[in-house]
């Protein structure tokens, strides 16, 4: 399995518009972050987790020429607002399968009603094939384990495929879900900033969870400029924990 970090930033991305914060002014490419998303590839299929406002740019940056499914973690704008940009994939492939919970599907229907019409659609607009996620499911002969977590008070999804788990926007992993996270090779999890946050893990929160889950490797994503310069943060992390950056590619056994 190959994983590409399409974006590793928080809802505003980095640099933040109009900001004079030193990280926003950095010349290091690793300090420039599009909104969080990831591309998973196995057996000739491409699966995107979340498609926020930078989706078009992320597809061009990664030279992705096919999307076989989109898995949605939750309905916040920085994770869904690029859905209209599936148009080129739709024209080449037909309806694009999406996987999401019922609440997220309903939110998408309100924002992108034309994408969900089966008849009478405007020529040139895309369509999707809706798959409501009720629990674990099979995609391309691989089990996708759904991990129910909390983003503040909002229930959202994390996903595990083989020995890789992907989370974004997590604040709490309920006790009953840790069983699904045993024997991970790669854990991808959010770390917003140094300071405490009411709905996201901060850096210490993330490190505490990594220590408990004990993956072979962990990568931090959904990062704010307030976390600090990429290299400065990386230099202080434990030896098996890495600050992800846009374009980083991983492989799992």
Image: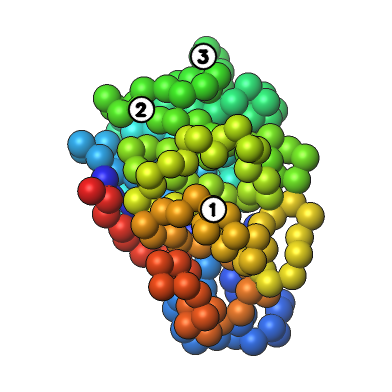
**Mark nearer the N terminus (2 vs 3):** 3
Q: Is residue 11 above or below residue 110?
A: below
Element type where label 2 sits in the image: strand
| Residue with the most extreme left position | 43
Q: Which mark is residue 118?
A: 3
Element type where label 1 sits in the image: helix
Residue nearer the viewer, 219 or 116: 219
Q: Are marks 2 and 1 in contact (CB under 8 Å)?
A: no
Which residue appears at 23% of the width and 48% of the height?
A: 253
Q: Nearer the viewer, mark 2 or mark 1?
A: 1
Residue 246 image position (x, y, % from top left): 43, 65
Element type where label 3 sits in the image: loop
Please give left or right for residue 88 compared with residue 15 in the image: left
Local packing at callout 1 (Cα closer than 10 Å; few below 14, some 14-19, many 20+) is few
Using the numbered discs, state the Cα–Cα distance from disc 2 to disc 3 in whole angstroms.
29 Å
Q: Which mark is residue 195?
A: none
Q: Which mark is residue 212?
A: 1
Residue 202 image position (x, y, % from top left): 67, 63
Q: Which mark is residue 143?
A: 2
Q: Quadrant of residue 116?
A: top right
Q: Nearer the viewer, mark 2 or mark 3?
A: 2
């Amino acid at each position: 399995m190959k994983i590409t970090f399409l974006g590793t930033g928080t809802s505003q991305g980095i640099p933040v518009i109009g900001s004079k914060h030193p990280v926003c002014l950095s010349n290091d490419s690793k300090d420039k972050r599009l909104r969080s998303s990831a591309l998973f590839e196995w057996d000739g299929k491409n699966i995107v987790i979340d498609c926020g406002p930078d989706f078009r740019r992320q597809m061009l940056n990664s030279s992705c020429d096919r999307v076989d499914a989109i898995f949605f973690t939750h309905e916040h704008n920085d994770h869904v607002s690029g859905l209209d940009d599936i148009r080129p994939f739709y024209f080449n492939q037909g309806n694009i399968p999406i996987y999401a919970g019922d609440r997220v599907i309903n939110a998408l229907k309100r924002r992108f009603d034309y994408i969900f019409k089966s008849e009478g659609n405007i020529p040139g607009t895309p369509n999707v094939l809706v798959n409501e996620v009720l629990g674990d499911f099979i995609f391309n002969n691989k089990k996708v384990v759904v991990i129910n977590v909390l983003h503040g008070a909002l229930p959202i999804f994390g996903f595990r495929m083989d020995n890789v788990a992907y989370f974004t926007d997590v604040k709490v992993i309920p006790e009953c879900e840790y069983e699904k996270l045993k024997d991970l090779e790669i854990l991808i999890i959010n770390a917003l900033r140094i300071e405490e946050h009411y709905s996201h893990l901060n850096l210490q929160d993330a490190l505490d969870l990594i220590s408990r889950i004990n993956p072979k490797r962990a990568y931090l994503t959904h990062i704010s400029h307030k976390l600090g310069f990429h290299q400065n943060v990386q230099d202080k992390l434990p030896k098996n924990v890495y600050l992800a950056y846009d374009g980083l590619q991983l492989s799992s056994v």
